[in-house]
Amino acid sequence: MRAFILLLMLASLAGCASRTTTTTEVASEVPMAQQTPQADGRARAKIHADLGMLYFGNRQVGTAIEEARAAVDADPGYALAYNLYGLIHSYLNEPQQARQNFDKALRLAPQDPQINNDYGLFLCQQGEERQAIRMFMAAVKNPLYTTPTKPYTNAGLCALRLGDDAAAADYFNKAFLEDGRNGQAVFHLADISYRRGNLYQARKHIGELHRMMDPNAASLWLALRIEHRLGNREEEASLGSQLRRKFAGTPEYQALMQGRYD
């Protein structure tokens, strides 16, 4: 559960007139994390919530809770403070408390993309994949959200849990289009292609992945299985040697030793 919490380019403007918005409308689209608070209480709440997210990211959960509490004390209406509480309770495997806080965050800021993405992750973790995907798609609708690759990736992971490879591949492709350095999306595109028997496409994706990052046990094992199916014994042996040298203690290497390619 804790490991789970570790996720198409926007169309060109059809015309200036069709996209004209008032200042108020534009401001309402700005995600809370990107807003500059005017009121003192809101400003202090944002500082504490931002700090809490940093501590949470470093797994300093106790300090993150203190910052979330301070954020709520400074401004009980600050949605991202409750979102932080939701993430913490989810990490602590306290789903009821997590859901209560995510619900409150969403009531306070129903269109906020960060809240929709984070709540969606929780719901997918709880086996509510279809609702989670709807929330991920709500997140990507905001044109001012700076990291739409995250909810697209998360939607792909949720679709995989549903056994829907076609939808998952579509989401991962969109995640990659939003961020060409999204290695998680590329890995899953390679894996889906491999399982579908599209071996040359799988090889292309895994090659892209290894050009952007150092191979890990999972990516080496996938690359090896691709070459095994293609009958490229020389490359298969080279990848097996890398797997043995770098990741001898992993389940992937054990599968290689036992000849369990699928």
Image (cartoon, rainbow, N blue to C red):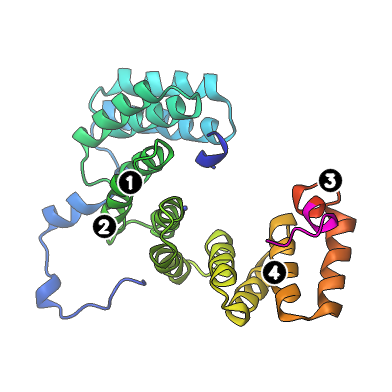
Question: Which residue: 32% across, 28% down?
Answer: 99
How far is mark 2 from mark 3, CA to CA? Answer: 44 Å
Whole-percent x, y for residue 57 in the image = 54, 36
Q: Of label 3 and label 4, which has the lower sequence position?
A: 4
Work out whether residue 244 can be spotted: yes
Mark 4 Cα-neighbour bin, 10 Å: few <14, some 14–19, many ≥20: some
Type of residue at label 4?
His
**Which one is in front in this view, the residue at disc 3 or the one at disc 4?**
3
Badge 4 vs badge 1, beta-carbon distance below 8 Å = no
- What residue did someone put label 3 on? 249
Badge 2 vs badge 1, beta-carbon distance below 8 Å = no
- What residue did someone put label 2 on? 142
Report whether 24 appears left or right of 201: left
How far is mark 2 from mark 1, CA to CA? Answer: 17 Å
Question: Regarding mark 4 in the picture, which secondary structure is present there?
Answer: helix
Q: Which mark is residue 210?
A: 4
Whole-percent x, y for residue 13 in the image = 22, 77
Which residues fall within the magenta stretch? 255-262
Q: Would residue 239 be counted in the magenta stretch?
A: no
